[in-house]
């Protein structure tokens, strides 16, 4: 039986791209906090899942990353969505919406 954390793991790249597209460049912790806040704390990405997902997105060319010094003088790696990431987001989001609608239809009609 799939766990909620399994579904989140699969959706994490999509969620990170969506957050970056809407909110602009953010560091990993801020992305995590956005996902938690928007989901009403129902989704809680683990640090061990988010950073590998961000690294894979960077390797694919869908996000760029740079080190910055924050207002409190700490170094943070900030991620921004690229044009290729915007295209990937549109395609992936459309697939998730179709799949979610089909699953919901089965759940309602079964």
Image (cartoon, helix red, strand yellow):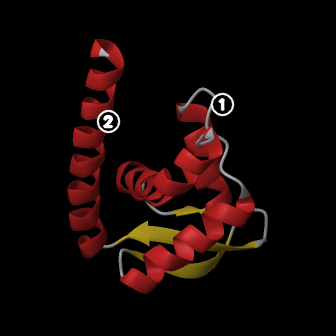
Measuring 58% from the left and 43% from the top, which residue is drawn there?
A: 2
Q: Position of residue 58 (x, y in %)?
A: 46, 80
State how far apart marks 2 and 1 are (Cα): 20 Å
How many marks do you count on the picture?
A: 2
Q: Position of residue 66 (x, y in %)?
A: 55, 81
Q: Where is residue 25 in the image (x, y as percent from the top left)?
A: 47, 63
Which of the 4 image quadrants contains residue 44? top right
| Mark 1 secondary-structure assignment | loop
Measuring 65% from the left and 63% from the top, which residue is drawn there?
A: 49
Which of the 4 image quadrants contains residue 20? bottom left
Mark 2 lies on residue: 100
Which of the 4 image quadrants contains residue 69? bottom right
Q: Tell me which label, 2 or 1, sits earlier in the chain.
A: 1
**Against 100, is 15 above or below?**
below
Q: How crowded is mark 2: few (under 14 residues within 10 Å), some or many (20 or more)?
A: few
* Quarter containing the C terminus: top left
> What residue occupies the far right of the structure in this picture?
73
Depth check: give the residue in front, 37 or 59.
59
Depth check: give the residue in front, 70 or 47.
47
Measuring 27% from the left and 14% from the top, which residue is drawn there?
A: 109
Q: Which mark is residue 5?
A: none
Q: Where is residue 34 in the image (x, y as percent from the top left)?
A: 57, 43
In the displayed structure, does residue 13 sit left or right of residue 88? right
* Quarter containing the N terminus: top right
Mark 1 lies on residue: 41
């Amino acid at each position: 039986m799939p766990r909620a954390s399994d579904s989140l793991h699969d959706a994490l790249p999509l969620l990170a791209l969506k957050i970056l597209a809407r909110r602009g460049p953010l560091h990993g912790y801020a992305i995590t906090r956005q996902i938690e806040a928007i989901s009403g704390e129902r989704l809680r990405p683990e640090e061990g899942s988010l950073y590998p997902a961000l690294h894979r997105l960077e390797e694919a060319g869908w996000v760029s990353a740079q080190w910055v010094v924050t207002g409190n003088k700490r170094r943070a790696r900030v991620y921004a969505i690229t044009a290729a990431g915007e295209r990937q987001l549109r395609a992936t989001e459309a697939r998730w919406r179709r799949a979610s609608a089909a699953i919901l239809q089965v759940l309602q009609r079964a």
